[in-house]
Image: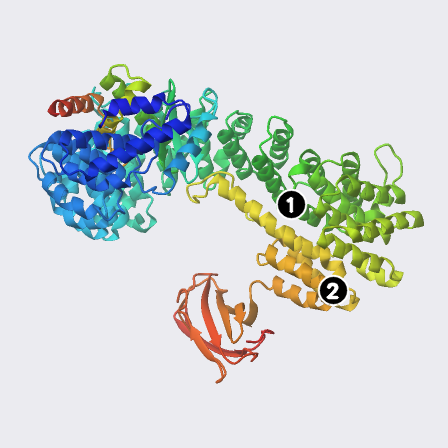
């Protein structure tokens, strides 16, 4: 999601069939109003917690359970960004805009059904390269 | 005809206005639909269509029309088609769609595909949108994959398996046998998957818990070897052994050890757990997120398990204290406060040691940290630190940068609740000084229910006590100087009416004596200033009437009389009714008035549940709702209070007063009139206008009996009936049976008979077992000839402590008829 609240990519791991759009708007309102320097990267939202981090103009936001470990999700967001950066070679927002379908492939290699499944950056990158070569 | 995805994205981005954008999107969406209908399109075109569809999805547009198309695409033999098809399916479909059945066949084929990437796609899709039906149809395929030698697929299959058992617990048996071989893997991904599967199995199928618990040594072993091995470049973040795996392992251990039912079988591993957690905590440092997350997980585990080594708990609390004070690291602070909050109930003393750090967090800029610090401050409050803590909190409250309305309301409510708990209060004078300071700085955030509580506290001071005069005088001085705070106005206007005589004996700040005129002028000018605040006007009306009985100056009395009479033309119905009744009472002879205007008896103080500000794991309430619920409560109470304010006009007959008054008083001060909803009270007002006051009186007691009419009370049980609905010829009655003992009541059976002219239908009882001090209900429906009386003969049986008991009684207390 960028600073203007435009969604660049989103994936829902549980059933949120109602009002996804509304949720997006609310989440954006909440997060963009927060002070980056002085506030923590966690905020409660409805029955979940949001863990977010801003990289340049983009927010990476993960909605997690109240009982989940916030810091590790923060680490995984960072890992995701590192992988994206390596995959797109210096990633920028426009890469994500035009290649949104590829991001999902990255996500799928890293997470499955909301659970982290692979934590090795090199391994994920190798896989992605190979999969792309199949096309 | 069809353009590329790129140009579509570009044109959407290039559009200047929202209308432009909409029209482009609409057009494209229509094009895609038409194109779907064309059976002759190539795969190339189909792919572009789906890509665009996904873009629409990201924009938040409707995409349901593409569901079938996605499934068609993934059935194609080409990898590129499959890839996009599965991707789109994962996003656009969810487990509730009927078209999922169309997917079964493709998934089945692809799970057995020789190409591992195709299998992986199928697994990912399955994991994301698994439905119970799919789980049943495809579990054999997943079982095959999970036992293969390919780590890449194994880890995915493990997670998918965990999803399968979550959807369909009956399948646990299939996968439990896989746990061992998964745990023997050396691949981190597989191990993470294995822990997830273990947790899911543990949660959904109790019959396998023992078997899973026997894996504890293995898991501890894994954790130990992970910590002692050399760093593995692939997995480790900034010199920390794969934190993801560490956390997954610790979390799994926590799942086992927090299950009280299995305490017998897990406790023998306690020592090993102690050791490993100590190693974990000392092996990581929280200067980096990853290390911090591991420590956090370990500390959380330490506190969620009972009977661990106390030394470990101390280590845990100290770690948290360090986290709190270490440096300006908000993430760590947030987490530390959060964990402390969950710990405070178990180890209050240890948490108290960090009081100063916690209080320092009150001045943090982050609102969520502030909230937590605040809640924690209230949680650690006891009689040893009440003075200093309340002082800090009031300082916080008076600081102008803290203007969050919810927070202020929370603080005010909480402080008043604390002041009601006399065991915490160092002395009475301190109590009322604090109260005055609270009212002064925060008068706007005192809601009606809080002001009722405050007034309750004041009424409860013995009449002879100097303190009463002192407090009333102190508050009056505040109100006299500041007309702008709503809560303060309410309190002071009420006090003037009730304790005008005490005020007359006291003095103002500058030693001028308080006179009759001063009091009546205060009320009247307050009313003029706040003319549109109906609640306040109601308070002032009652006060004026009461004050008239406490003062001697006839000019002041006349002013009050004129004021009351001026309100008889008020546009507000409630106020008008009140003013009219009051002006009648005003003209009654003194001896009648005296009985009516006497001081209120002190109401009992009810212990309040503490309200929480933040989400706790145990009570997954959002902040929003917890605060909303206080609001809605307030809304209800205010209605009840209106009833109390109406008290006077309902009582032209003094001899009925006493019993009623106390009831209504309880209502006002205890806020326990959940039935007094807005609708009812307003209809009451209307009734009051047209009917005799006697009818009003009859209605009001009904409201206070919201818990039903008691029919039987023994030392073990209480039975009461509530009439939920009466229509001509039929009635709906709720029976409530409460257990008054501290042991379980079981095999409860209720037999009820009605007169022969009526017919009874009983619903099943909500629960045949009543927990200690619990309540169960059962609904009855009675149908009979119109306006016949409801009579019940009740016989009921139950077992308590294994002894059978029988009770029988008749009940006919309902005034209402069919």
Horizontal relation, residue B649 to residue B75: left or right? right
Seen from the viewer's position, the closer of residues B262 and A38 is A38
Dot 1 corresponds to which residue? B450
Residue B487 at x, y = what percent? 69, 41
- Label 2: few (<14), some or many (≥20) within 10 Å? few
Residue at the extreme top of the image, as rendered: A90
Regarding mark 1 in the picture, which secondary structure is present there? Answer: helix
Q: Are marks 1 and 2 on the same chain?
A: yes
Identify the mark at residue B658; answer none if there is no mark. 2
What residue do we see at 21% from left, 35% from top? Answer: B35
- Label 1: few (<14), some or many (≥20) within 10 Å? many
Judge whether residue B131 can be spotted in this image.
Answer: yes
Residue B395 at x, y = what percent? 63, 29
- Residue B490 sits in quarter: top right
Horizontal relation, residue B165 to residue B298: left or right? left
Q: Which comes before the other along the chain, label 1 or label 2?
A: 1
């Amino acid at each position: 999601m960028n600073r203007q609240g435009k969604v660049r990519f989103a994936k829902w791991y549980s059933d949120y069939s109602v009002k996804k759009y509304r949720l997006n708007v609310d989440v954006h309102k909440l997060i963009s109003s927060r002070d980056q320097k002085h506030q923590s990267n966690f905020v409660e939202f409805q029955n979940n917690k949001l863990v977010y981090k801003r990289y340049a103009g983009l927010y990476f936001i993960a909605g997690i359970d109240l009982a989940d470990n916030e810091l590790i999700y923060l680490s995984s967001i960072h890992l995701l960004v590192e992988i994206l950066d390596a995959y797109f070679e210096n990633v920028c927002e426009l890469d994500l805009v035009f290649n949104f379908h590829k991001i999902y492939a990255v996500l799928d290699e890293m997470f499955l059904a909301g659970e982290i499944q692979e934590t090795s950056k090199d391994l994920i990158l190798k896989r992605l390269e190979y999969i792309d070569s199949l096309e | 005809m069809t353009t590329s995805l790129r140009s579509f994205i570009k044109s959407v981005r290039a559009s200047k206005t929202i209308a432009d954008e909409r029209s482009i999107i609409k057009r494209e969406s229509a094009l895609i639909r038409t194109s779907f209908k064309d059976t002759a399109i190539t795969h190339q075109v189909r792919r572009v269509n789906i890509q665009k569809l996904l873009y629409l999805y990201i924009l938040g547009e409707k995409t349901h029309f593409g569901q079938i198309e996605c499934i068609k695409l993934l059935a194609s033999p080409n990898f590129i088609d499959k890839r996009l098809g599965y991707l789109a399916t994962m996003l656009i479909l969810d487990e509730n769609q009927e078209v999922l059945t169309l997917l079964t066949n493709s998934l089945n084929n692809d799970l057995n595909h020789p190409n591992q990437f195709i299998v992986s796609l199928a697994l990912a899709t399955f994991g994301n949108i698994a439905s119970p039906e799919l789980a049943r149809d495809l579990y054999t395929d997943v079982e095959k994959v999970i036992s293969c030698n390919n780590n890449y697929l194994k880890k995915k299959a493990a997670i998918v398996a965990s999803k399968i058992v979550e959807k369909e617990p009956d399948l646990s048996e299939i996968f439990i046998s896989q746990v061992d071989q998964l745990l023997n893997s050396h691949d981190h991904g597989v191990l993470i998957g294995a822990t997830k599967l273990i947790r899911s199995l543990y949660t959904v199928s109790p019959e396998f818990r023992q078997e899973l618990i026997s894996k504890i040594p293995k898991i501890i072993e894994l954790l130990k070897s992970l910590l002692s091995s050399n760093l593995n470049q692939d997995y480790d973040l900034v010199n920390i052994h794969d934190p993801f795996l560490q956390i997954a392992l610790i979390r799994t251990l926590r799942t086992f050890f927090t299950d009280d039912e299995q305490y017998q079988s897990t406790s023998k591993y306690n020592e090993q757990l102690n050791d490993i957690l100590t190693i974990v905590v000392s092996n990581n440092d929280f200067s980096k997120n990853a290390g911090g997350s591991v420590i956090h997980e370990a500390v959380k585990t330490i506190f969620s398990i009972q009977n661990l080594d106390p030394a470990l708990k101390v280590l845990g609390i100290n770690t948290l204290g360090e986290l709190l004070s270490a440096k300006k690291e908000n993430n760590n602070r947030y987490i530390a406060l959060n964990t402390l909050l969950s710990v405070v109930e178990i180890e209050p003393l240890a948490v108290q040691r960090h009081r100063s750090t916690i209080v320092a967090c009150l001045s943090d800029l982050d609102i969520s940290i502030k909230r937590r610090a605040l809640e924690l401050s209230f949680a650690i409050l006891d009689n040893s630190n009440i003075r200093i803590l309340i002082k800090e909190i009031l300082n916080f409250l008076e600081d102008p940068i803290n203007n969050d309305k919810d927070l202020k309301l929370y603080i005010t409510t909480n402080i008043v609740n604390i002041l009601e708990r006399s065991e915490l209060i160092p002395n009475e004078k301190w109590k009322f000084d604090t109260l005055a300071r609270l009212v002064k700085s925060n008068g706007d955030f005192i809601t009606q229910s809080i002001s009722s509580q405050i007034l309750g506290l004041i009424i409860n001071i013995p009449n002879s006590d100097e303190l009463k005069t002192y407090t009333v005088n102190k508050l009056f001085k505040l109100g006299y100087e500041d007309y702008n705070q709503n809560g303060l106005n309410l309190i002071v206007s009420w006090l003037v009416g009730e304790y005008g005589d005490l005020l007359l004996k006291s003095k103002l700040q500058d030693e001028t004596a308080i006179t009759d005129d001063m009091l009546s002028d205060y009320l009247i000018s307050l009313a003029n200033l706040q003319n549109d605040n109906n609640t306040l006007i109601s308070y002032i009306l009652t006060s004026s009437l009461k004050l008239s009985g406490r003062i001697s100056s006839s000019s002041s009395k006349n002013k009050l009389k004129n004021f009351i009479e001026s309100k008889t033309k008020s546009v507000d119905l409630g106020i008008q009714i009140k003013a009219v009744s009051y002006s009648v009472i005003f003209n009654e002879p003194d001896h009648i008035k005296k009985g009516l205007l006497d001081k209120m008896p002190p109401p009992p103080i009810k212990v309040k549940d503490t309200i929480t500000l933040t989400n706790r794991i145990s009570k997954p309430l959002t902040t929003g709702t917890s605060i909303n619920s206080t609001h809605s409560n307030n809304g209800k109470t205010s209605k009840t209070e209106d009833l109390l304010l109406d008290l006077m006009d309902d009582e032209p007959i003094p001899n009925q007063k006493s019993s009623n008054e106390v009831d209504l008083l309880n209502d006002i001060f205890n806020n326990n009139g959940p039935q007094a909803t807005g609708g009812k009270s307003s209809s009451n007002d209307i009734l009051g206008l047209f009917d005799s006051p006697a009818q009003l009186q009859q209605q009001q007691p009904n409201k206070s009996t919201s818990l039903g009419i008691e029919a039987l009370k023994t030392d073990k049980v209480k039975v009461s009936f509530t009439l939920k609905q009466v229509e001509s010829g039929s009635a709906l009655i709720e029976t409530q049976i409460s257990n008054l003992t501290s042991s379980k009541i079981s095999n409860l059976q209720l037999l009820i008979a009605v007169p022969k002219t009526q017919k009874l239908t009983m619903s099943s009882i909500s629960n045949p077992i009543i927990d200690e001090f619990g309540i169960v209900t059962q609904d009855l429906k009675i149908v009979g000839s119109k306006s016949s009386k409801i009579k019940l003969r009740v016989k009921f049986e139950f077992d308590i402590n294994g002894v059978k008991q029988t009770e029988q009684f008749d009940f006919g207390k309902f005034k209402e008829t069919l």
